[in-house]
Image (cartoon, rainbow, N blue to C red):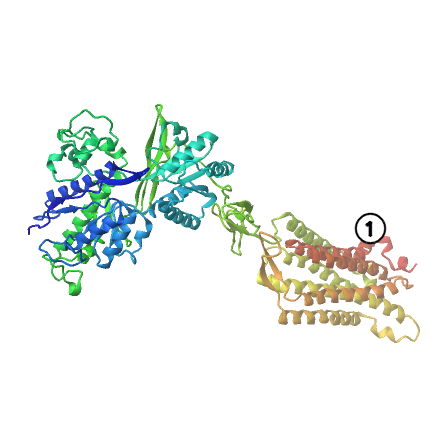
Amino acid sequence: MTSTPQEIPELMGVAEKQSSVGKARVRFNSASYKSILGLIFAVKEVNENPDLLPNITLGFQMFDSCFTESAALQATFQTMSFDENQTPNYKCGSEPIAPAIIGDVSSSSSMAMARLLGLWRFPQVSYVAALPSLSNKFEFPSFTRTTVSTRSQPQALIELCKEFNWTWIGVIASSADYFVQGVVEFRREAIKNGICFAFFETVNYNPINNRIPKMLEIVSQSTAKVVILYCSSAEILLIFKKILQQNLNGKVWVGTEAWYTTSATEKQFWTILNGTIGIISSRKIPPNFSNFLQTFHPSKYPRMPFIKTFWEVLFPCRWPEAEVNIHALNLGQVNETCTGLEKVVTNDEAEFNDPTATCVNMAHNAVYAIAHALHSLLYCRPGEGPFHERSCANKQDLQPWQLLHYLRRVHFVNTAGEDVSFDNNGDIYADFDIMNWHFRDNRLQYLKVGIFNDYLDKKLSINDSAIFWSPVSVCSDVCPPGHWKMPRRGQPVCCYDCVLCPESMISTETNSARCFSCPQDFWPNSKRTKCVPKVVEFLSYEEPLGLVLASLSITFSITTMMVLIVFIRFRNTTVVKANNRNLSYVLLLSLIFCFLCSLVFIGCPVKLTCSVRQSLFGIIFSLCISCILAKTIIVVIAFKATKPGSNLRMWVGSKTAMLVVSMSTSVQVLIILVWQIEFPPFLEQNYEVLIGVILLECNEGSVVMFYCTIGYLAFLATISFVVAFLARNLPDSFNEAKYITFSMLTFLSVWSTFIPAYLSTKGKYIVAVEIFAILLSTFGLLCCIFGPKCYIILLRPSMNTKQYLKS
């Protein structure tokens, strides 16, 4: 297959027409011309590549847009039709229509072209236009570009702020349309990522701008250490001059591609630029481009316009025919004569440091993108195509919209080793170099300290060791784990106070927006950074309090057992027999069980102990108080029975005592049965009583039934106290009513103080209070009733006779 396009360089986009004081002049734009040389170099490489478009020669035609939209549209019409009447998308000649257009260098011209080309889905690739609005595929459906959109630069700045934890920054932005679109995108993304602005000032280029000093005064008073300058190089010159005049220090200036490597790096600004960080497009240059420049000379392209102008500006020299107005190009007096054999001495390093290297690389990529799209289109296999019924394009009469399909899907590695592909908006993935100005060896130079690549998962990569500063720019310090950020009223979200999490909550991350509650069985540690298991608490035998109470319980029960043994040993003595010997045995046994029942309250509670401990306590104590009540009643009956004609003689005896004991105890048993059936106690884990503690306790099931049990005991004790008090002075030698009175007084005193103590105590000490009341009241009964008797039996045996008691 042979090619039909020809290499016809007609008008080059390298001239700029301006007016100055009403007089027209011409300024040659050598930077744009250099990017055009990159296009020519790329076409040459494609045609020499046997694998990309074999047997096909790629040609091109160039038009000069003169930096005006009208000229750009005129050239676009001509490219689309080759018709003298310039009817778009209408072929009336034998020459093939160009399948794609590269350009323009101006964003405004590119937008005008894109609106026209989009109507017929005619592929357009720009390597300079960067306005983010061109990414709108609804408005510009056929526009693609190999330069980075201005929308990508804000993303890189956001990642840079996140990398260095700059959450409190200032911004000075240009009011020009190009910068406004980018800075609006930056502000929107910054807010999404939690970055706040200490100030946001706009500036416009005006040599007598009086607003800059006031703006810099705001900057100097701000606590933000980082200031992003989203401006043009001309505006930066004005700002830096004022910074020097005001001696503004202590700020880190972050530069954007528009000015970071331009003439703003004059020697007078070195003190300001030292340490600044900036973003520029990756400046990887095509290999062998420097060799191409060295072998490039006008004789190879005699029809190429402005080639001689470029030559005169580059070297400088003057062609013999003097076709160029040297003075108009501001070259001064030139004596050298151009031969056309001069060599452009350059190397890869020099090309990299040249700001125009980016445009050369992007232009190179534009040509290769179209070449790869053509390759995919021309080598489509029948039946595997992307069009109707899986058809391929007609290779003899290919349509631009068919090439656009392949162009949007190209993905290749260029000669510099970069991945090149377009996203859904037709934009190339951003590839920036992060640069840092260093003052070394009495000169200022910028070093590459990182990269930003939007195509990678980890977009930003920074070599921290290459940066000699570590600025901190935050409104508030970092909140450590265990704290949360409490916003300050009326201030941005980046300004907050670090507050320790509440007692039951934690935070495990720095700068946590809120604290989190621990699970029910866990509790925060002292620093509120993690949840630890709560302490399970109960009155155990291992702790001192439980050990003391258990020891007292056993000691008192042994003491009571010894008293019982003494009574059994001296059962036939007068003192034992005179005080209802059998009832005394039952009372002593009940006292032993009263002491021992307190052991059920100590130790880890289980379901069984929760069910029986209050029942045992209530029944045994009822039995004990019933025995004392029976003793008191027997004393009264015995005294009354001594009167002549008394009918109470039949009630004097053990039957009466057993009747009183059984009836009094039965009532308590009935209360306990109702309690156990209707409101049974159960084991409970109490999380609310003590902070950070799981209290393992027995829930009584019904507080009312518990107080009914205690109340019934108090009722029996009160009756015993009243009867004993009334019978204390009866003229009976064997009367023990005095001792019973004191014992009941002790019992009632203990349990009357138990109720408020029980209600005011928490945790395991509730159990300790009840045990203490049981032991103290029982010991009071033992001492008051049996203490005097043991004294007589063991220490005063002479008093333990009937004759002595009767006397």
| Number of residue marks | 1
* Relative side of 461 to 606, left or right: left
Amino acid type at circle 1 is Leu
Locate residue 593: give its quadrant: bottom right
Judge by depth and name the residue closer to the eye, 669 or 3.
Answer: 3
Residue at position x 89%, y 70% in the image: 640
Q: Position of residue 575 (x, y in %)?
A: 83, 59
Judge by depth and name the residue closer to the eye, 720 or 490.
Answer: 490
Residue at position x 88%, y 76% in the image: 647
Is 289 situated above or below 737? above
Judge by depth and name the residue closer to the eye, 485 or 112.
Answer: 112
Q: Position of residue 774 (x, y in %)?
A: 71, 57
**SS at circle 1:** helix
Q: Is residue 455 visible?
A: no
Q: Position of residue 581 (x, y in %)?
A: 79, 63
Q: Residues within 10 Å of mark 1 (few under 14, many from 20)?
A: few
Is 61 situated above or below 382? above
Is 676 situated above or below 71? below
Q: Position of residue 335 (x, y in %)?
A: 19, 24
Locate residue 238: give its quadrant: top left
* Relative side of 495 to 544, left or right: left
Judge by depth and name the residue closer to the eye, 558 or 184.
Answer: 184
Write down the residue under mark 1. Answer: 795
Is 703 situated above or below 424? below
